[in-house]
Amino acid sequence: MSKQRIAVIPGDGIGPEITEATISILEAAGFQAEWVYLEAGLGAVDKGKPPVPQETIDAIRDIGTALKGPTTTPSGGGHSSANVTLRKALDLFANVRPARVLPGVKTVFGDRNLDLIIVRENTEDLYAGIEFMPQKDTALAIKVITREGSERLCKYALVMAREQGRKRVTAVHKANIMKMADGMFLDSFYRVAKEFPEIKCDDIIVDNCCMQLVTKPEQFDVLVTENLYGDIISDLCAGLVGGLGLAPGANIGENCAVFEAVHGSAPDIAGKGVANPTALLMSSIMMLRHLGRHDIADKIANSIMRVCSDGKCLTIDLGGKASTNEYKVEVIGQLA
């Protein structure tokens, strides 16, 4: 039986360190794969290539599944985002960001139970990058919302909710102001919602959503939203559960899926051996479930729970003193 092929983009900064730790844990848990390493990010740029070389895009399209470490996007002019490039090139229209409190991890809410999922549109909105300057001191950015893009995202969110036994899906929007663009998104949501009568479907304006998330976050189950709002509220939710070091993510398309840590490349701590690999590791759990390997996914998830609950081997960002390698060894040791 041939091994499952997985494309791997180690990324920049701490990317290679947390990627190595994640793959070691996957293999220790029994997941044997053919790891196909690809270039993207500053490493490619330094060689005179685009942030995502065409050969990387072609390889992921052929393989179908990728595990990606964080890549660096310089602010201002220059190079485009590797993340945005991959999402557009591979039509990875749904960005899935779970936010769940882990036992033993200190959060701003103490021990309150939070377990929600943000499903963010990934290819449209202001992230389409359509900008121009009609005058020297005026810049315009065009917000792109399509009915097709909105409906397929909302259907993905509702199907996912049904498969996971979740009871409520809430559309996040600003249709009170952007009546055409966000109005279309909201209308698309309720059109698709008619196909899922067993799920409670409602909506909330994005600013109110942010306030509710920092006061009563446990009221939400699944949030489905446009690209820019989703970018903001998913990081807000990561803060509620302990930080971006615990925030996994998946980019899902019809034919490809890229699973990535959503935090940055943290060049200030790169090479110091203190990076927290949990976000990428939890992203790999999402990858395993996507591939139908729930047995190994459960094994790793339970190990992370045990390590966090014990609290004796946490990385610095979680208030501990463990190195990346020490954390990796502890997670492997707790596999059952």
Image (tube, helix red, strand yellow):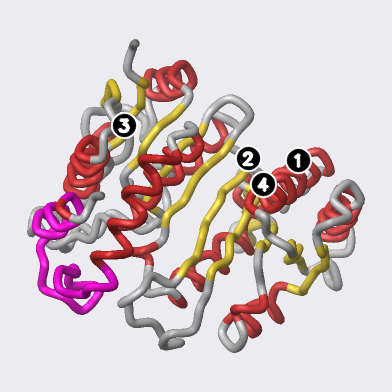
Residue at left 18%, top 68%?
Answer: 315
In the image: residue 97, left or right of residue 197: left
At label 2, the amino acid type is: Phe
Give coordinates of residue 133: x percent, y percent.
63, 52
Task: Find numbered disc 4 in the image and state the secondary structure of the residue it sits on.
Answer: helix
On residue 152, the disc is 1
| Residue marked by disc 2 | 93
For marks 4 and 3, give the one nearer the viewer. 4
The mark that comes first in sequence, 2 or 4, is 2
Cβ atoms at labels 1 and 2 below 8 Å apart: yes
Residue at left 63%, top 64%?
Answer: 229
In the image, which residues are magenta? 308-332
Give coordinates of residue 141: x percent, y percent.
66, 54
At label 4, the amino acid type is: Glu
Give coordinates of residue 145: x percent, y percent.
77, 48
Local crowd at mark 3 within 10 Å, few (<14), some, or many (≥20)? many
What is the C-alpha distance between the residues marked 1 and 2?
8 Å
Give coordinates of residue 212: x percent, y percent.
65, 83
Task: Find numbered disc 1 in the image and state the secondary structure of the residue it sits on.
Answer: helix
Residue at left 37%, top 74%?
Answer: 242
